[in-house]
Amino acid sequence: MYAEIDTQDYIDEIVDNIRKKDKIKADLVISHIARMGADVQRRMLQALSRENTDFTVSYIIHLLEIAATLDIDESEIIETLQDMLLQRPENIRFLLENPALSEKFDIIDLIAELQYDGAVPYLLERLNNEQDQQNIIRIIRALGSIGDPETVNSLSEYLYSENRPLIMAAIEALKEIGSSNALEALTERIGTDHEIDARIVDIFALIQDEASLKALNRVLKTGDPQLRNYAKTKLIQIGPKVVPIIIDNLRDDDSEFVIHSLNILGMLGDASAVNAIRQLLFDHPPNGNIRFAAFEALGMLPILKGIFVLSNGLSDEVDLVRKAAARAIDRNNTSTLRSGIRNLIRNNDAEARNIVSAFIDAEADSIFRNMIMESPFRELAMDYLKKDAHPDLKKHFGDLLKQIGYNDLAAEIEPRSEEDQKRLNIIVVDDSRMLLKVYKSNLHDIGYASRLFEFPETALDHILAEKPDLLITDLNMPKLTGIQLTEKVREKYSAEELPILLITTQTDKDETAEAFKAGISDVIYKPFTKEHLKATIDKLVG
């Protein structure tokens, strides 16, 4: 009779069968398990789980199949099996081969937790046939957790779904995979939705391997100025590891791409970029905006050799470039550079006046201190400060002259009343402090006063509170682009109430069309002359 069987002998027998993998005897012992009480069944379950092999898993699955005949609860068997699968994920195949059993588990989440790549075919089949959105999202997440690059094509299809949660789930799954083809799929998705685009940029910036950094770099070529600026910010935050990639951009034919790359190199401040920028200037790119950006970048970098390239910029035909070169020289002031300046201005001619005025407009205090008592620098500087410089510059250099003991010279350039300035309320918005100084100087020269804003969001608050007579704005600015600023201003003021002048580069012509749709009144392309600026302002404000 069965009642005469010793329960310990029963357990010992199954343990011995497990150790020897004796299936015939084990089958015989297990066949009696339903007749044993809950205590023996539980001890049997524990004995099987201690030997976590294909052999024992198959018997636990058998216990699950006959759970209805046992005294222990089915949940105990499920919990034991889950623990065993976590230790040996490959054994999940037993569940995948038994659909009836797999329904007893949260099989998708279990696969995701186990990251079992053998389940990929099962998941892809489920994905193709699933209709429930939440289950589709769970399957996509499971595939991302497994990280098999072979699933990229299937996941990429969901990047173009009309269902936003599915799009975001696919983006996150491709992030988890992180392979080159996954990053390429994400790159190709960029361009239609700012929130989605920004999330993809965040992913590139988070991964930071070579493929993701190159993908992030390619975003600089996008036509969306807000996204491009966001990518620039991320590249700058990443730091020196992006420098080699950005340096390679300087050989590109896309001038706007080169300019953004120069901006980044300047902000990163890594000396390894100096040689590449210097070589770019030696080749004298025909686009003045590139030359301006190059000198502006050099002004932020420590230049250890080949510094004479800076003095070449002082003779540039474009006023903006001369001022950027002057600022760069001031930040890298050496006796060698000062000798170069003396040589350039020795003839005391119109070119010499342009060079010295560039130093004044750039507020090149260091050069001014060193050279103010040298002729002809002193004559040219004082003449410009007396006759043409902006009152703010007169005050600035007047204070500087007093600091270094030249009170008599300071008295000569005391700012006079600005009653001759046209009393238009002109607001200028540009995220480049250097360009703001240029605008201030140019507007003064043509007879207008101005108020300058480096941050467009601050300018917007002021404009909405107090309407100016004219708004001049750059296109490419972080956080708020010129187009976005225009859209927000137009919510309150019509074009008749407040003309808006956009100043940008020739390469932004496609975006300029968008700017006109947003409500700008006119556009000037960089580099521009003071005469062109004056004619455009007079046309807009009468």
Image (cartoon, rainbow, N blue to C red):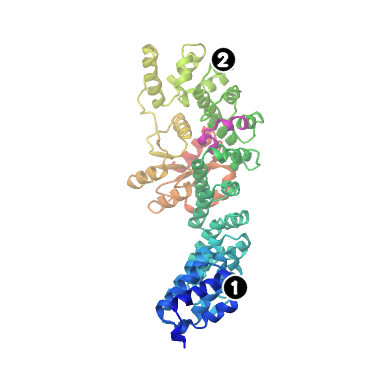
- Does the rendering let one see residue 41? yes
Front one among 443 and 320: 320
- Does the rendering let one see residue 413? no
Q: Say what amino acid the circle numbered 2 marks.
A: Ser
Q: Say what amino acid the circle numbered 1 marks.
A: Glu
Q: Residues within 10 Å of mark 2 (few under 14, many from 20)?
A: few
Which residue corresponds to mark 1? 125
Name the residue located 67 percent from the left edge and 31 percent from the top edge.
Answer: 283
Mark 1 or mark 2, earlier in chain: 1
Q: CA distance from mark 1 to mark 2?
A: 76 Å
Residue 249, image quadrant: top right
- Mark 1 vs mark 2, foreground winner is 1
Magenta-highlighted residues: 263-276
Which residue corresponds to mark 2? 339
Q: Position of residue 359 (x, y in %)?
A: 49, 23
Residue 480 in magenta stretch: no
Residue 270 in magenta stretch: yes
In terms of secondary structure, what is the magenta stretch mainly?
helix
Name the residue located 43 percent from the left edge and 48 percent from the top edge.
Answer: 485
From what the image shows, is residue 292 above or below residue 370? below
> Which secondary structure lies at badge 2?
helix
> Which secondary structure lies at badge 1?
helix
